[in-house]
């Protein structure tokens, strides 16, 4: 850790057990991928418009605050949970909500309009994958794999999109443990279920599992099973520096370490393995 800058790695919990990591679970959007950067700018206005259409007398500013709060708190869970909450808010205001799955499809259609050119550019080679990758994420994955850590990817985004976007970034080969994402039958997958399965199947102690993500959910679940958790407080728009709001939320969720991205991947890996 010689020469380490505080801006690169912030140790929240210096008491973690180092050197035992055998498995690692990574979130995708905002942790590895920037393909969907700006998704909140699609989801939140869509939801506010739907709530306005109920005829509520609340000002848009108030509705925006309500939506931002539950969208942020549910980030990391499957997208359907945000849409289920939207349906509840519509009903609460006397409206007639659509099925959450219909809201989710509406959101995906709008988001695709924003990101289609990004995905197509990655696939046809006209865009460098690093353009839409959290800086040095590939180096971190490579460093862990070289230490025989089995890597899993777990996302709240629909599985078919995740698989497609991981491949577009050229990262599929790192995830020898598997790639997991949201399903239309949402009860068939969750990050909690995956972490429980990994812990049970492999008989792990907490320090043998590393959880890495930029969302409240995966960090909270990593803490619950006793794993080591790294909160990636990535500023997705600037691709550099700390997002202060994310940092606060990730620390509240129980992150042991906070990083802005993976520029210090070498020092971070050495720290985790007590080299």
Image: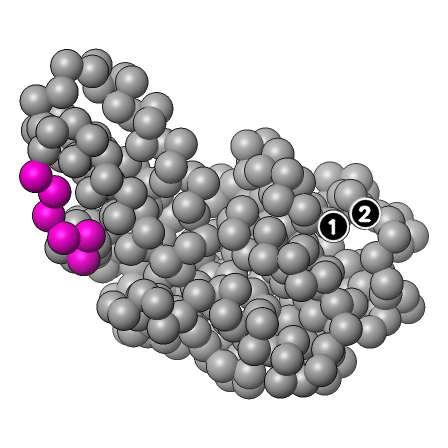
Front one among 117 and 162: 162
- Please tell me whether residue 98 belongs to the stretch shown in magenta: yes
- From the top left corner, tell me how far across and down residue 185 is, in percent: 27, 70
Relative side of 179 to 206, left or right? left
Residue at screen point 25% across, 68% down: 184
> Does the rendering let one see residue 30?
yes
**Residue beneath label 2, please?**
13
- Which secondary structure class fits the magenta region best? loop
- From the top left corner, tell me how far across and down residue 168 is, in percent: 37, 72
Front one among 228 and 96: 96
Report the quarter where the N terminus lies: bottom right
Residue at screen point 78% across, 67% down: 207
- From the top left corner, tell me how far across and down residue 140 is, in percent: 66, 66
Which of the two discs, 1 and 2, labels the residue nearer the N terminus? Answer: 2
Count of numbered labels shown in the rendering: 2
The kind of secondary structure element at disc 2 is: loop
In the rendered view, tell whether residue 157 sits above or below residue 22.
above
Report the quarter where the C terminus lies: bottom right
**Residue beneath label 1, please?**
256
In the rendered view, tell whether residue 53 sits above or below residue 97.
above
- From the top left corner, tell me how far across and down residue 28 is, in percent: 47, 62
Residue at screen point 86% across, 65% down: 18
* Dot 1 alpha-carbon crowd within 10 angstroms: few under 14, some 14 to 19, many 20 or more: many
Q: Are marks 1 and 2 in contact (CB under 8 Å)?
A: yes
The kind of secondary structure element at disc 1 is: loop
Q: Quadrant of residue 63?
A: top left
> Does the rendering let one see residue 270?
no
Q: Quadrant of residue 127?
A: bottom left
Magenta stretch, residue numbers? 96-101
In the rendered view, tell whether residue 162 sits above or below residue 15.
below
Kindly report the distance in space between the C-alpha atoms of the residues bearing marks 1 and 2.
Answer: 5 Å
């Amino acid at each position: 850790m010689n020469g380490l800058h505080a801006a690169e790695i912030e140790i929240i919990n210096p008491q973690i057990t180092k050197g035992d990591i055998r498995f690692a679970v990574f979130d995708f959007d905002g942790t590895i991928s920037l393909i969907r950067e700006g998704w909140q700018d699609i989801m939140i206005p869509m939801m506010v418009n739907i709530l306005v259409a109920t005829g509520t007398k609340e000002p848009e500013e108030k509705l925006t605050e309500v939506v931002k709060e539950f969208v942020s708190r549910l980030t990391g869970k499957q997208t359907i949970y945000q849409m289920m909450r939207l349906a509840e808010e519509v009903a609460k205001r006397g409206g007639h909500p659509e099925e959450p799955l219909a809201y989710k499809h509406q959101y995906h259609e709008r988001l695709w309009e924003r990101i289609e050119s990004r995905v197509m550019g990655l696939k046809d080679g006209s865009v460098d994958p690093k353009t839409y990758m959290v800086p040095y994420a590939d180096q971190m994955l490579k460093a862990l794999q070289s230490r025989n850590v089995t890597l899993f990817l777990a996302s709240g985004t629909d599985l078919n999109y995740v698989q497609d976007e991981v491949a577009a970034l050229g990262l599929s080969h790192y995830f020898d443990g598997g790639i997991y994402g949201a399903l239309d039958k949402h009860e068939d997958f969750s990050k909690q279920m995956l972490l429980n399965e990994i812990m049970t199947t492999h008989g792990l102690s907490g320090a043998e599992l590393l959880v890495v993500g930029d969302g409240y959910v995966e960090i909270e679940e990593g803490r619950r099973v006793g794993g080591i958790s790294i909160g990636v407080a990535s500023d997705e728009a600037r691709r550099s520096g700390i997002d202060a709001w994310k940092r606060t939320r990730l620390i509240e969720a129980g992150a042991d370490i906070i990083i802005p991205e993976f520029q210090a991947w070498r020092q971070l890996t050495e720290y985790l393995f007590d080299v």
